[in-house]
């Protein structure tokens, strides 16, 4: 033992290291000789995970492969790790399910649309980070959403993800039994992100609850789907109840994202821009250029947060 280092101090350091590492809630994985991350086209015997991903500290996930490729190019330039117009290969090129890009300590991964798609991606992403022996990881979902009572273009940092009845929980049926999991997100991380938004001072940002639904149309009270058996008054009453409960935006991934990050001991946040105010309509009618600029806002906020965390601001 090094001089001056007590057994108590050593134990505390080891405990801290364990607490900051990925926690897998699956004892069966230890018995497997190989772990194939099928939807990433990666495997523990075919790829050296610690060499490929061991330096990762920030993981950003979003629905669209093209958006996540644009984000990795943006963050590479912001961190001074890439050249203008540089190409970033898709690490998951062996599959068309998801796309993954990396530069320095940042991993950018697409997750598709809806709870099932992001759930599959997260299972394999969390295992990837575990096999790579990553520690002190921050995972942030960046995306788009429908706002409630906010001007279009506002950014919402999620306090809690709530279900369609405004309860902060994720419900899943496992082996025929219903399991309820918490959807709280890291409060300190949300405050750090809000402070970053104040520092860049480019767009309105709030902390609020995010309602996570099972679909885009009926589940979100839209009147413009192929099926709609309620009227506009009922829709507005529901959305106003959501607002009164603390909900500021609606999307389709945050509940399982929060639940899985909680179980894995990972610091996590959800940062979404609102494309419209759902109290004023259902269809997204802003111009292409306006929508592109809106979609860049979560990237700018999270990019600044990463720079600040790395001492590059």
Image (cartoon, grey):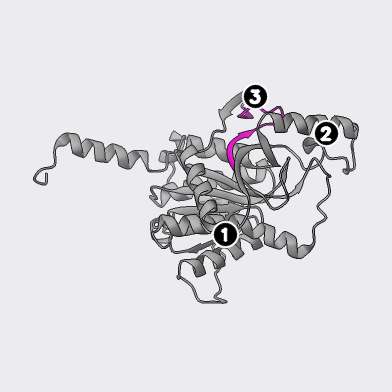
Q: Position of residue 169 (x, y in %)?
A: 61, 29
Precedes in sequence: disc 2 or disc 3: 3
Q: Quadrant of the C terminus?
A: bottom left
Residue at image point 58% right, 62% down: 71
Identify residue for label 2.
236
Count of residue discs: 3
Which region of the structure is painted magenta? 157-174
Q: Quadrant of residue 258?
A: top right
Element carrying mark 1: helix
Residue 176 — which label? 3
Measured Cα–Cα span from mark 2 to mark 3: 35 Å
Crowdedness near tag 1: few (<14), some (14–19) or many (≥20) residues, C-alpha within 10 Å = some
Q: Quadrant of residue 4?
A: top left
Residue at image point 45% right, 49% down: 129
Q: Position of residue 268 (x, y in %)?
A: 51, 43
Crowdedness near tag 2: few (<14), some (14–19) or many (≥20) residues, C-alpha within 10 Å = some
Measured Cα–Cα span from mark 1 to mark 2: 32 Å
Precedes in sequence: disc 1 or disc 3: 3
Identify residue for label 1.
300
């Amino acid at each position: 033992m090094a001089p001056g280092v007590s057994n108590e101090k050593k134990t505390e350091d080891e405990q801290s290291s364990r607490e900051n590492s990925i926690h897998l809630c699956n004892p069966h994985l230890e018995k497997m000789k190989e772990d194939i991350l099928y939807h990433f086209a990666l495997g523990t015997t075919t790829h050296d995970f610690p060499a490929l991903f061991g330096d990762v500290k920030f993981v950003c996930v979003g629905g669209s492969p093209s958006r996540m490729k644009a984000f990795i190019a943006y963050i590479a330039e912001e961190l001074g790790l890439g050249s203008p117009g540089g190409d970033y290969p898709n690490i998951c090129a062996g599959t068309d399910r998801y796309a993954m890009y990396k530069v320095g300590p940042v991993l950018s991964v697409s997750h598709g649309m809806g709870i099932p798609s992001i759930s599959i991606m997260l299972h394999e992403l969390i295992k990837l980070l575990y096999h790579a022996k990553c520690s002190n990881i921050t995972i942030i979902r960046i995306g788009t959403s429908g706002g409630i009572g906010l001007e279009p273009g506002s950014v919402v940092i999620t306090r809690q993800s709530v279900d369609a009845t405004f309860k902060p929980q994720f419900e899943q049926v496992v082996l025929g039994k219903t399991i309820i999991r918490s959807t709280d997100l890291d409060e300190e991380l949300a405050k750090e992100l809000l402070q970053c938004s104040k520092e860049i001072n480019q767009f309105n940002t709030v902390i609020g609850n995010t309602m996570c639904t099972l679909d885009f149309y009926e589940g979100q009270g839209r009147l413009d789907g192929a099926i709609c058996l309620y009227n506009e008054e009922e829709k507005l009453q529901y959305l106003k109840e959501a607002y009164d409960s603390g909900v500021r935006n609606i999307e389709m991934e945050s509940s399982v994202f929060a639940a899985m990050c909680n179980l894995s001991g990972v610091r996590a946040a959800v940062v979404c821009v609102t494309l419209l105010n759902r109290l004023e309509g259902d269809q997204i009618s802003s111009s292409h250029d306006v929508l592109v600029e809106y979609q860049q806002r979560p990237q700018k906020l999270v990019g600044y947060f990463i720079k600040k965390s790395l001492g590059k601001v």
